[in-house]
Image (spheres, grey):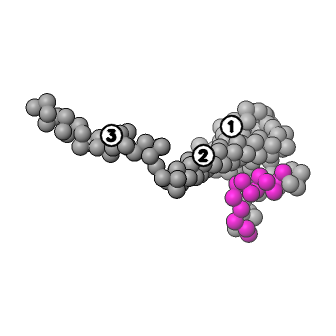
Amino acid sequence: MKKAADRRYYERNAEAIRTRVNGNFHALSLEEKLERGRRNREAEGKESRRERCRVEQAKLKRDVLLGYGGACECCGNDYLPHLTIDHVNGGGTQHRKKETQASLYRRLRREGFPRGEYRVLCWNCNWASHSLGECSCQRTEEGGDALSPQL
Ligand SMILES: [Zn+2]
Ligand SMILES: [Zn+2]
């Protein structure tokens, strides 16, 4: 019984045990060692490139949001994770050229944050101004009817 269990254990772990017993690093051929090192370095490089890329993306977005005032132009929300770059004319030029968000941000930063076409909005105001045509915070500030007739 115990033997059978041992056997199953051995079979399941045969690979690991073989490696532990006689396949340890020192037993590898030089080529295998080099190959193993190369693979490790490759994995590390890929990981840090991804991390650098993520950090760079976050910094890029932060630069652009701050370049456009760092606060929602509609409600004044200045909590950066809630902010987005809004295309003032509703993306009318998007069909002209397929531009990813990252390349748009890079272009805006390169061009010194040109005014007019883009502005900072929070997600709420962005959604409202695009789907309702007007954000509710604009209505109350103007003293108008706070209730949208479309709702
Ligand atoms: Zn807002
Ligand atoms: Zn608003």
Residue type for callout 2: Glu
Mark found first going from the N terminus, 3 or 1:
3
Q: Are marks 2 and 3 in contact (CB under 8 Å)?
A: no
Q: Which residue is mark 3?
A: 17
Task: Find disc 1 in the rendering and name its residue.
Answer: 82
Q: Secondary structure at mark 3?
A: helix
Relative to residue 7, is residue 28 drawn left or right?
right
Please give the range of residues in magenta. 96-109
Residue at the outermost top position:
2
**Do the residues under discs 1 and 2 have CB atoms within 8 angstroms?**
no
| Quadrant of the image occupied by residue 151 | top right
- Return the residue nearer the eye: 43 or 114: 43
Q: Check disc 2: other Cα within 10 Å, few if <14, some if 14-19, many if 20+.
A: few
Q: Viewed as shown, does residue 86 lie left or right of 68?
A: left
| Residue visible at 66% across and 40% down in the picture | 124
Give the foreground label among 1 and 2: 2
Instruction: Indicate the quadrant containing the N terminus: top left, top right, bottom left or bottom right.
Output: top left
Do we see residue 132 in this rendering?
Answer: no
Q: Give the x, y percent position of residue 61.
A: 75, 45
Q: Which residue is the site of mark 2? A: 44
Q: Amino acid at mark 1?
A: His
Q: CA distance from mark 1 to mark 2?
A: 32 Å
Question: Percent x, y for residue 80?
Answer: 73, 36
Whichever of labels 2 and 3 marks the residue nearer the N terminus, that label is 3
